[in-house]
Amino acid sequence: MKKVLLVLMASFFSMAMVSCSKSNEDLIIGTWQETEVTYTEYNDGQQIRTESMLEEGDIVKMTFKDDHTYSLTYVSEYDESEDNGTWSIDGDKLTIVDDDYAMVYTIDKLNKKECNITYTEEMDTAKMTIVIKMKRL
């Protein structure tokens, strides 16, 4: 009986883990607008610079499609561009691939209305992070 109970519990936890990652995929599908993008730079653990990467009036929209492709539209006072690529989610990691260059973001918050992701890059004593906050349209 103990063996059956252990097998059932293991099956339940396996299904729960699969459904969690599936729900992240389901939640991210749709169109999002960036509301805040913050770039922070560190050296030897000390924060040396923080700045907003989203200028007033800039509009950045990202659409995650259920076929695991995305499109990004950027509109500013001086420029307009579009980008396309693929995406995938594994646990709390969102990978966005554009022209064979992959960026792996950590999903800090993801629900029906908000998505916050962080990209971190470290080299020797330097570190930089980009935090992107988005709202669903």
Image: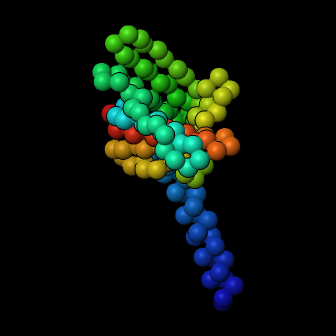
Q: Quadrant of residue 114?
A: top left
Please tell me which residue lies in front, 123 or 137: 123
Q: Quadrant of residue 122?
A: top right
Left or right of 136 on screen, residue 47: right
* Residue at horizontal 59 percent and vertical 47 percent from the top: 44
Please tell me which residue lies in front, 130 or 64: 130
Left or right of 72 on screen, residue 135: left
Which quadrant of the rendered structure holds the N terminus?
Answer: bottom right
Q: Is residue 41 visible?
A: yes
Q: Specify the farthest residue to the left.
A: 57
* Residue at horizontal 49 percent and vertical 40 percent from the top: 48
* Residue at horizontal 42 percent and vertical 29 percent from the top: 53
Number of numbered discs overlaid on the protein picture: 0
Q: Is residue 118 visible?
A: no
Asked if residue 106 is positioned above or below residue 40 in the image, the reply reads below
Left or right of 115 on screen, residue 4: right
Please tell me which residue lies in front, 46 or 19: 46
* Residue at horizontal 61 percent and vertical 65 percent from the top: 14
Q: Position of residue 102 (x, y in %)?
A: 64, 33
Q: Quadrant of residue 18?
A: bottom right
Asked if residue 60 is positioned above or below residue 3 in the image, the reply reads above
Asked if residue 41 is positioned above or below residue 10 in the image, the reply reads above
Q: Position of residue 22 (x, y in %)?
A: 53, 51
